[in-house]
Image: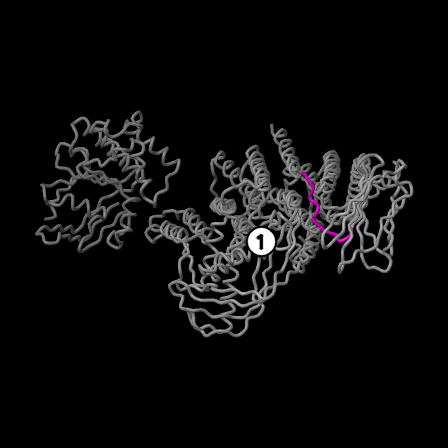
Amino acid sequence: MESKIKHLFLLTIGLYFLFGTGSLRADIVYPSKLSVVEINPGIFEITFILPIINGKVLKAQPQLPNSCSPTSEPIITGDNNSKIVRYIIKCDQLSLDGEQIGITGLMGNTIDILLEVSFLNGREFKVKLSPAKAFYIIPTQPTFLELMGSALSRGIQLILHHFGLYLLLLVVLPLMSVKRWLKSVLFFALSFGIGQWLYFNEVLVIPPHVLTLVLLICAFLLGIIQLTNPNTKLHIKPYISLFFSIVGLMIGGSIDLSDKLLTLESINKTLFLFELSIGVFIGLGLMALLVLSLVNVLKMFKGFNWSFFLIFCLSLIMGLGLRELSLFYAMPQLIPQIPVLTFMYILISGGFNGKLYGKNKIISALALFGAFGVGLLIGYTGLEFIHSGLVVAVTILVLSVFLVFKKQLNIAIHIGILIVSGLAAGHYTAILLDSTISYAIAKSVGFSFILAIIYMVMTYLVAMTREIALSKLTRKTLLIMLIVPPIVLGLLALINTFIPNTILKASIGYITIPVFSILLIILGLWSWPRYKKIHKTMNLQKKSSFYSVLFIGLALIFLPYGMTINNPWNKQKNLNTLNAKEIIGNILTTTYTAFNNDDEEILFEKLSQSVSKDLLDDVYLDSRRRLTMGLREGSVVTVEKVKIESLGEPETSNDTENGITYPAQWVVTARVKHLQHIHYRNNKYTGSIKISTEDEVWKISDLTLVSEDRTVIAASNL
Amino acid sequence: MIHCKEILFKYPNSEFKLEIPQLRIESTDRIAIVGPSGSGKTTLINLLSGILNPMKGDIFINNINLTEYNKSDLQDIRIVQMGLIFQEFRLIEYLNVFENIIVPFRINSILKLTNEVRQRASELAKMVGLEDKLLKFPSKLSQGERQRVAICRALIGQPKVLLCDEPTANLDPTNRDNILSILKNYSLNKKIPLVVITHDESILPNFNRVLNIEEFK
């Protein structure tokens, strides 16, 4: 039964890939492009795009092989920015291998032109042509032996260059029998091939720097477990093949071989991936031999102690891990964009499931990841899941409190909670990633594997605290180490969102009363168990503060939810430039971020908090037009930041009732998503803003724009 | 063990006065307190249970001096230390027998309702012969059965003293003997003092000590 469940688990992981279909290529627009697409055998559609600069078109022409001749009249279209020429050609040769395609008439220009050639047999070429190198020779197809040789050597090299794997093997190999090791290597190699295929199809993308760190963390934790638990070999046995399959898939999903794969025929692509997997198998085998030889050589020395060696390895791993982490410190944008809440959720639910035994443990994992996968699907298909983020936050809290107070739920309720929260977590993750990163689907599949590893490690660690004879202090310390990071992350998230938002609202005259939180705090304090002197005298046990902690935790989560009222303590003072800058900045932030709401009713309600009634319609129409100006249809714009660049002296008297007008310059940074691709853009405005008080609240009463400047910000890391 | 020292109690605006210079009730004692109406029997039980506070003196229940604690602490002491049984059964009509027995654990935050408590409730019901009536409601029970439920409710918290105010006043002789035998056996088995207020002289042979409240006057 257990092995069937294990297979089902593997199958579920496999099912993740079913929803990641369709093209996910970024919407990169080249000013000039020559596209040669085979539409029927020997018949090609030519599309040639040229930019129009200062009203003039470049006098360049496509240079096609001599055996090809046009069969249709060119159709010329375009707009103010580009000229597009389309026509069909017929080539007498069966294959264009070794033929030259290029552009003539580029000399004396600095323009680059993208050449795209695709054949019916699946071969594709993408080359950037420049005036210095204006031609490209279509490479001949590799022979079977060439293909095999290159795939095998590539596979071996890829593995042997992965230093994280050496350390992982050093820690894991001594725990495995030869038979199990061979099985794991086989799974690893096959998963690698699958991972690579998924990467090529843009269904799975794992940032390589993240992968190295994940491998080092796994090696470190496995080493620690080995040092502390003499039965590690026994515990690890059932999971090792699954573990290596996931690692293989992740490594496969992190390596970009598309340059090679694109140039191959469809059948050769499959062959290449298969032989690459064989190369990986050999590579990992060689690596294992190297590692085992090293261990054997060391064992020849008298007095060699495996535990000491393991400690040495762990120190090395820790050092390398810190080195990798310093990379994130130096470049925070490299940190994987797994939402903090999702990360915490997996960490805590992993720990919570670690308290279960045998079949229940596997069923819970299945329920969690199955629901998470379905939740991702729901999120990406745009279906609603009401307040999914809130459901995840509440679940994190409830599970943490259960974990800390060592309480266990009935297994049916336990699984029910995991299914509902897993769905919510998947939905929340999909919605968040979809709006913030490029290749969201592919990356979320990659992240799912990172999360699966985190989950496995967490489950194992908590199970270990239960099974090994640890002292009470060690057990408590371990539990605190596992619980504190998610709690700190949660509090940080709360501080980063709730406090600035409250300050922002308060500064323009609003105050949010967190009614739920106040009630929950009262409930928490009221139910807090009192341990009085008389209880001690009567030898009564201290009562658990489980419910109180739960209520107070919920109060923290519900802090952002409450009633917004006018701030009764807000006294409109004479404005000086410094506080005017702060207040106007906050009013503008409230105004522009209101456009992040899809619901028009909510948008108007939020807008009315910072814009005077008379101006509401004008500001709505004008700001919406300016934010989406120059973007393609279907683009989603999310305002991220509003910053006052400069604020001049007031143009009118300091009269809060009738309004004060300031000349100002401000920048609105917005995230734009189009066709799975994300970029940022800055809209810089110059004009004058008039603010006045309406019901004791500062609002914009007039807005005059003098100029507007839009710039796109490169965001390669997204 | 119960120990009263130099107790003086008076009701405000009343001539009534209760003075107890010395009273020791050991854990092996099964004591009946007798006396005419208005002599202070119920007052004494209320003093021993901490419901009333003496003007002077100390009352020790298992070395805890009741006079040193406030109302809230005294309530906790009563819950943990004492089993109180009254003439009226004070059962909750809409709860069944089992729920009535465990009710102290439902309403007192100081007590923790666990499976062990539920098990104990079933055992107590068996002990008093109510094992087949656990799902019945009080309205379907006889007077004797209702008092047995009240006894189980008093014993569920494993009290250290048993204080009973006319526990058999409303019962026929068979039920009366039955209830007294249950209380006596429990006190003997658990080695806890049993204090019973009664005006029924026929039950006095069940006790190893009889105290006439008039002796203190």
Residue drawn 31% across the image and 28% down it: B134
- Viewer-proximal residue among B170 and A507: A507
On the image, numbered disc 1 is attached to which residue? A638
Mark 1 lies on a secondary structure that is: strand
What is the residue that sits farthest to the front in this orientation? A73
Majority SS type along the magenta span: loop
Q: Subunit of mark 1?
A: A
- Viewer-proximal residue among A491 and B58: A491
Q: Which residues are magenta?
A: A21-32
The answer to whether residue A65 is left or right of residue B34 is right
Q: Is A358 drawn above or below residue A683 in the view shown?
A: above
What is the residue that sits farthest to the top in this orientation? B132
- Crowding around mark 1 (Cα neighbors within 10 Å: few <14, some 14 to 19, many 20+) is many
The answer to whether residue A636 is left or right of residue A566 is right
The answer to whether residue A381 is left or right of residue B108 is right
| Count of all numbered marks drawn on residues in the image | 1
Residue A455 in magenta stretch: no
Which quarter of the rendering shows the N terminus of chain B?
Answer: top left
- Viewer-proximal residue among A523 and B14: A523
The answer to whether residue A275 is left or right of residue A639 is right
Q: Could you tell me residue A529's position as x and y percent?
A: 37, 50
Q: Quadrant of residue A152?
A: top right
Q: Could you tell me residue A467's position as x and y percent?
A: 56, 41
Q: Amino acid at mark 1?
A: Thr
Using the rendered image of the protein, determine whether residue A159 is visible from the camera's viewpoint. Answer: no
Residue A30 in magenta stretch: yes
Q: Quadrant of residue B157?
A: top left
Q: Could you tell me residue A338's position as x and y percent?
A: 61, 49
Q: Could you tell me residue A440's position as x and y percent?
A: 64, 46
Using the rendered image of the protein, determine whether residue A348 is visible from the camera's viewpoint. Answer: yes
